[in-house]
Amino acid sequence: MYGRLEKYHSIFVSHYGDLCNYASLFVPAHDAEDVVCDIFANLIETKDPSQISRSYLFTSVRNRCLNRIRDRRSSRAYQEYIAERLSEYFETPDESLLMDIKEQLCNAIQDLPERYRQAFVLSRFSGMSNKEIAQHLNLSQKTVESYVTNSLRLLRTALKDYLFFILMMI
């Protein structure tokens, strides 16, 4: 057991700073440290140290940060933080870039298969839960989850060139 904890400690010491810096690209610094610590706490409980790679750690940090952003997107303070971060990158938002992103997003949503689009729009724009969508569309809840997940995957692929800008605007 001691050898295993020593391996986790070695991984933690080797990657902590880089992971915190990476996480701080997505979330405030105090949240970045929490995200990285949460990931390591979870890894100790669920993964063998020999299965942990650098890319796995960075992917975990990115996903955890995106989840945190999604969970906080309605928070006023967090919206102000994102606006500050945007102003660091852009002195004045380029209206044509914003219009292009909006157009690409609308086109990508329109290109989704009909049932995917219905589930996605109800989930993301109407704020309905998967259970409510399932009842509304007369589908199983698992099917709705699958439709929304597949919609996000397809949108991510279609909007890969704009993903950074979209994330910064959320």
Image: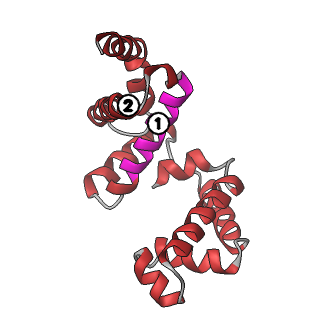
Query: Image height check: is 127 above or below 138?
Result: above
In the foreground, 115 or 76: 115
Confirm whether the magenta stretch covers residue 6: no
Q: Could you classify mark 2 by the number of other residues whose Cα lies within 10 Å: few (under 14), some (14-19), or many (20 or more)? A: some
Label 1, on which residue?
Answer: 60
Q: Does the CB distance between marks 2 and 1 fall below 8 Å?
A: yes
| 151 relative to 64 in the view: left or right | right
> Disc 2 on helix, strand or loop?
helix
In the foreground, 8 or 127: 8
Q: Extreme front residue here?
A: 1
Q: Residue at position x 69%, y 74% from top?
A: 110
Q: Which residues are magenta?
A: 54-69
Closer to the observer: label 2 or label 1? 2
Label 2, on which residue?
Answer: 43
Quadrant including the C terminus: bottom left
Give how far across and how far down residue 132 sits, in percent: 41, 83
Magenta stretch secondary structure, dominant: helix
Query: Image height check: is 6 above or below 115?
Result: above
Residue 100 — which label?
none
Give how far across and how far down residue 61 sits, in percent: 44, 35
Give how far across and how far down residue 12 sits, in percent: 36, 17
In the foreground, 161 or 19: 19
Q: Residue at position x 30%, y 29% from top?
A: 37
Q: Residue at position x 59%, y 80% from top?
A: 118
Q: Could you classify mark 1 by the number of other residues whose Cα lies within 10 Å: few (under 14), some (14-19), or many (20 or more)? A: some
Amino acid at dot 2: Leu
Q: Specify how the rendered protein is coloured.
A: secondary structure
